[in-house]
Image: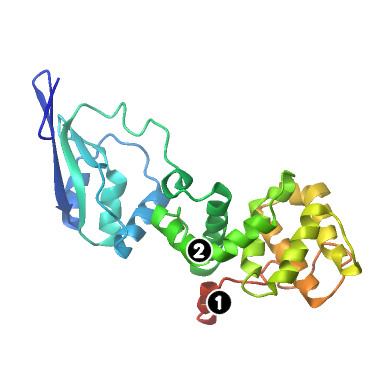
Amino acid sequence: MVQKRGLNIKKGKIMKIQVMTITPQMAVDMLKKNTENRKLRESTIETYATDMRNGDWVLTHQGIAFDNDGKLIDGQHRLYAIIRANVPVETLVTTGSQGHMNIDTQIKRTPTDILGIEKNKVAIVKMWKEGTVRFLSGRKSMLSIAEIKGWYDIHKEAIDFAVESTHTHKLYLRMNAIKAAVATAYYHVDHEKLKRFCEVLISGEAVNELDKDPLKLREWVIFNKDAKSSSNRLVYLRVQQVIKKYMEGVVIQSVSFKGPKVNDPLYYLPEDEEKLENV
């Protein structure tokens, strides 16, 4: 095999790699050659398109590939995203690839691998964004690396506070929903009182009557089957509800809350509140 100037020559076959600017119409034309590919993932298309619209899509060594017969074997999600974003995108285009058997079969890099941000901090961002997207804007998609970094950079202080204040080795108390709820409350309540709330929640040691609130929450998280089997959203809401009562100086009798808006968050991120004002 001989490698020279971007050419991969093997048994008389040449693989050519070049940088091209793909317009939406070019993407439509290329997709006509998409006859043997994996099932499309709508969330991936929307994630790519969002980055393209926002100018966060960058040129890398990955791109669009065609085999020796001219069939599209890699890059269909990128092409559909270019059409959806309706913007031209610069990318690598490979022709003469030797097939798709070894494409995307290795270990995928995680946001933690790429950004160096701790896994539980990435999880908080994902919970926030999924919650915001799902319940406010209606958009459902994966978060791109650029979006994760953007949100973390904006809310780093709140996220770091939540992770540090709720650090524990106890399995159920390590739930990311708890950390996300604390990080959101960080924007609305006294930080020293919130830190004290977390100390009691994690340690299980109370010194006054009001400390019964985080103790009740602790018991619910550890022993109640609803907390263990419920969605992250329910745990997130219950933590917010107990934090609010604690901040108001109200001693709760249980973690069961009732009311017409019991399933609505009590605390929002600053940017979420702006969206709510326009709903």
Q: Earlier in the sequence, mark 1 or mark 2?
A: 2
Coloration of the structure image: rainbow
Badge 1 crowding class, 10 Å Cα cut-off, few under 14, some 14 to 19, many 20 or more, is few
* Residue found at the far top of this picture: 11
Q: Amino acid at mark 1?
A: Glu
Tell me residue 137's x, y (percent).
Answer: 49, 68
Tell me residue 220's x, y (percent).
Answer: 81, 54
- Left/right of residue 111 with respect to residue 188 in the rendered view: left
Q: Hey, which quadrant is residue 263 in on the image?
A: bottom right
Please tell me whether mark 1 sits on a helix, a strand or a loop. Answer: helix
What residue did someone put label 2 on?
A: 133
Q: Residue at x 55, y 47 (%)?
A: 119
Q: Identify which residue, 23 or 42, lies in the foreground.
A: 23
Q: Residue at x 31, y 27 (%)?
A: 102
Q: Residue at x 61, y 73 (%)?
A: 187
Q: Nearer the viewer, mark 1 or mark 2?
A: 1
Please tell me whether mark 2 sits on a helix, a strand or a loop. Answer: helix
Against 263, residue 175 (above or below) is above
- Left/right of residue 127 with respect to residue 151 in the rendered view: right
What residue did someone put label 1 on?
A: 273
Q: Amino acid at mark 2?
A: Val
Quarter of the image with the N terminus is top left
Residues under labels 1 and 2: Cα distance? 13 Å
Q: Answer whether residue 32 is visible to the viewer in this image.
A: no
Tell me residue 92's x, y (percent).
Answer: 20, 44
Question: Is mark 1 in CB contact (under 8 Å) with mark 2?
Answer: no
Q: Hey, which quadrant is residue 23 in on the image?
A: bottom left
Q: Residue at x 16, y 49 (%)?
A: 29
Q: Identify which residue, 217 or 85, lies in the foreground.
A: 217
